Image (tube, helix red, strand yellow):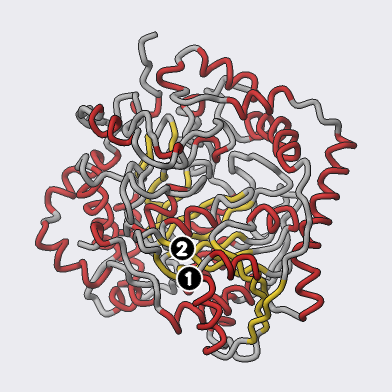
Amino acid sequence: MKPVLPLFLFFFPFILVAQYDQSKEIEAQQKHENPRMRFKLLQPRAATYVPWAVFDKELEAFSENRYQELRPLILEKDIFTLQKQINSRKLSYEELVLFYLYRIKKYESNPETALYTIISLNPEALKLAREKDRQLRNKKIKPTLFGMPILLKDNIGFAGLPTTAGAVALADNFTEDAFIVKRLKEQGAIILGKVNLSEWAYYFCEGCPLGYSAVGGQNLNPYGRKVFETGGSSSGSGVAVAANYAVAAVGTETAGSILSPSSQNSVVGLKPTVGLLSRTGIVPISSTLDTPGPMTKNVIDNAILLQAMLGKDAADGASVISEEDFTERISTATLKGKRLGVMKSLLERDSIYKKTAETLKALGAEVIEYDAPQAPLNNFLTLLNADMKKDLPKYLSSFASKTVKIKSVTDVIAFNLKDTLLRRAYNQKIFETVAADTTSEARLEAIKNELQTNGRIFFDVPMDEHKLDAVLSINNYHAAQAAVAKYPAITVPMGYKITGEPISLTFITSPFKEADLLQLAFTFEQATKIRKPAQKYAE
């Protein structure tokens, strides 16, 4: 069947990236030891939209010389430093946005460096930045996030750009702002655009590559392009932050979708307690477990972004009011006297984790080794299947634009079968399983309760026995347990393997203790300063 271009490609005047011959790259990729890294394609099969084309005139006037002059003022800098540069007139909000747009074009327009992480860019971004500069000249009060360019995972609603979840079926899904996006705008943030993700938040195809979507193509890891996995499903958010394509990004997690790509791309990712941040306007997997969260280059920016998204949302039954000031609490951070639990099984299998435990001791923490309790997560996938089967139709009826004709998981499956070449490069086996689910409401509630009980046993038994402030894990190793327990988790870079692949330390604690997690993570980060930028994307 002849491929059909997604409708969103016609939203702006556009140019198409020349489709280069990927065959040799794809052939070489089939030798990768990891089956999920044996890609079928890099660019999406649809002609690829150039999102920066709308800024062509401004980018032509923004020279490489000016980019290089601004690079030491912007690259790898935290929000407080950027605001200081702007207040001292060394930099403007307009130049900050131009710098990121130029950088995106610089790397993404070159097939040898493209990470396939940007799906769309906000055509109003520069206009908004100029307005922020005018407000600054008039000395209007500005919040910390004021004027900062932020990228969104493309399952988060933003008025003016389609919200695709990486799927061709949602290519023309123009929605209103998600609740958290409204909060970001109220705080003065500039939404720079949307980033790629594992399609349908990686609950779509079985055994397919992390970071692949039909709309965005194959997201790649800047620390090892085509060598290391990006993690998923918030792959684009992790990759974009690591590549310095924006100040920060927002991801979403059901079970590991923030922790995994943050770890794989050596950035800081926080999975909050369900309910701390609104889910309204976000394409769902599970109303039981879903949550958005901040992904940043450092912990202080993570706290700032989290703070900006807070707010009670009447439309989200899990939403809570939080009066916490996360940035203020960080200033009193210390590891002295903190009791941290480390799992003996991880100490035995990972030398970097073991070395990190010794570092934490040297920093004044009390490190307690323990055997993780047995707490099976039976029927975990049944929970996801049953939730998605009912939650996705609710989203499609309440938030998707009227131009979207699909109304259910079954509709998506049928839609994709009309053009498998373009719409379903790998398979849609998980969606087929979701469509076949027959779990009753009573059975689903029983499963939720059992999973939450076992998830909390996994953490509460050692935490209660040893009076722990937090449990320490690696990457997203225990993301499923944290998800069903509804415990928050933050992951922070703790090193790099011999191959150069990033690895992170993950702090997990009790619900709504995000401030405690941020304190622990901040102290560890500042004492060790382990994170380093991806070498090929440091210019």
Q: Earlier in the sequence, mark 1 or mark 2?
A: 1
Q: What residue lies at 72% left-to-right and 78% top-to-bottom?
A: 468
**In this figure, which residue is indicated by the disc labeled 1?**
352
Q: Residue furthest front?
A: 348
Q: Identify the residue under disc 2.
A: 503
Vertically, is 96 above or below 530? above
Image coords of residue 177 (percent x, y): 53, 45
Can residue 217 be seen at all in this image of the molecule?
yes
Image point 88% across, 43% down: which residue?
446
- List x then y, in percent, for residue 514: 64, 70
Query: Visible in this render: residue 143?
Result: no
User: Would you say the residues marked 1 and 2 are in contact, meaning their CB atoms lie under 8 Å apart?
Assistant: yes
The amino acid beneath tag 2 is: Ile
Q: Pick whichever, 208 or 412, lies toward us.
A: 208
Q: Name which residue lies at 83% across and 56% down.
A: 453
- Badge 2: how crowded within 10 Å, few (<14), some, or many (20+)? many
Q: Quadrant of residue 326?
A: bottom right
Q: Secondary structure at mark 1?
A: helix
| Kind of residue indicated by mark 1 | Ile
